[in-house]
Amino acid sequence: MTAQITVAVIGLGAAGLVALKNLKEEGFDATGFERNAYIGGLWRFSEDDKTSVLNTTIVNISKERVGFHAFELDTSC
């Protein structure tokens, strides 16, 4: 029996979420840590004194191009 490798992913923005998902799919005992009460990193607007997108940010890339394959695409939006 092989020991399962334990890994920590620090920060659950877009890259951290993908890393956590892929590590778990590869059989690692992975846990994600985020200092905020939400996930999404810079891509969630925050009025706090920290880096985030602007409240008026509009992303001009398609959901089909940048979506996560593990989640169903909502085409109603």
Image (spheres, rainbow, N blue to C red):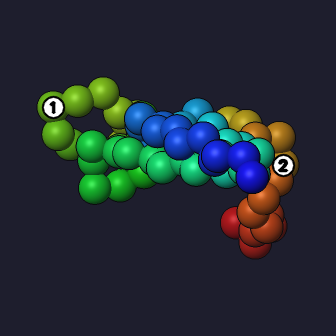
Residue ID at (78%, 59%): 70
Local SS, label 1 = loop
Residue at 53% x, 42% y: name it.
6
Q: Is 65 left, or right, of 36 in this rendering?
A: right
Q: Residues within 10 Å of mark 1 (few under 14, many from 20)?
A: few
Identify the element where label 2 is drawn: helix
Percent x, y for residue 22? 71, 44
* Residue 72 x/y as whole percent: 79, 67
Give the residue at the far bottom of this rendering. 76
Residue at x 64% of width, y 46% of height: 3
Toward which corner of the image does residue 35 lie, by quadrant? top left
Which one is nearer the viewer's eye here, 67 or 5?
A: 5
The location of residue 46, given as percent across then percent down, is 27, 44
Q: Is residue 72 visible?
A: yes
* Residue that mark 1 sits on: 49
In this orientation, which residue lies closer to the viewer: 56 or 46? 46
Q: Amino acid at mark 2?
A: Glu
Q: Which residue is mark 2?
A: 64
Left or right, residue 15 beside residue 64: left
Frontmost residue, 7 versus 36? 7
- Between residue 6 and residue 71, name the one nearer to us: 6
Distance between the alpha carbons at the discs numbered 2 and 1? 32 Å
Callout 2: few (<14), some (14-19), or many (20+) C-alpha neighbours within 10 Å? few
